[in-house]
Amino acid sequence: GCFDVIERLVPQVVRALEDQGDNIGSVKLRDMVTLGMQIGHSKVFLRRQVYEALESLRNKWLSKSAIIIQKHTRRFLAQLDYFDAFMATIIIQSFGRQIIATRSVNWYREDTAAIKIQRTYRKFIAETNFIAAKLIAQFCQAYRKGRIARQTVKMMRVEKQAVLIQ
């Protein structure tokens, strides 16, 4: 209990007093009176010099504890900032990829539409040329057949007249 705490504190108090300039040497638990410490039934009595040494130790410990708390707080805040920056980066990258994908899809749709328009136009031109060629062929065939038929009829008339004349 209390003695264990004091046994742990005595070497630290000795070091603190030596740091302040008091040369006490090695002090055992029995020599606490020379240090300025006395244990009562419910209290520990300290001289001013020992009290200040203990306060110095307490302040060092509080300072170290505050530094550790500050370190962990700064780390936590840095992690939050990093997470925010990380998420912002992901959102920006996602938006960039979305724009690239949208442009790619639009380009594909425009390309597909252009191909359909070109195919339809070429089909129209081919059909128009085919119909024109067909009409020309039909006209030429009709003209040729008509000419042959006229020549045949003319020859038949000439033969008929020749037969009649004979």
Image (cartoon, grey):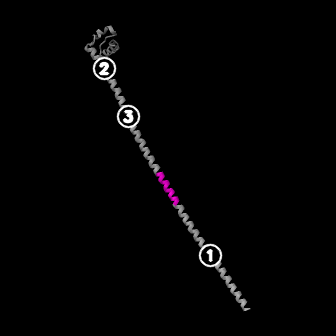
Task: Name the image quarter holding residue 38.
Answer: top left
The magenta segment:
103-116
56 with respect to 138 (left or right): left
Q: Amino acid at mark 3?
A: Ala
Q: Using a 10 Å C-alpha cutoff, classify the residue at mark 1 as few (fewer than 14 neighbours), some (14 to 19) or many (20 or more).
A: few
Q: In the image, is 92 to the left or to the right of 134?
A: left
Q: Amino acid at mark 2?
A: Arg
Mark 3 highlights which residue? 78
Distance of label 3 from label 1 (alpha carbons): 91 Å
Q: Nearer the viewer, residue 26 or 104?
A: 104
Give the residue pinned by disc 1. 140
In primary-sequence order, the first of circles 3 and 1 is 3
Rendered residue at 32%/23% (across/down): 62
Rendering coords of residue 103 (x, y %): 46, 52
Q: Residues within 10 Å of mark 3 (few under 14, many from 20)?
A: few
Residue furthest to the right in view is 166
Q: Secondary structure at mark 1?
A: helix
Q: Quadrant of the C terminus?
A: bottom right
Which label number is shown at residue 58? 2
Q: Nearer the viewer, residue 43 or 21?
A: 43
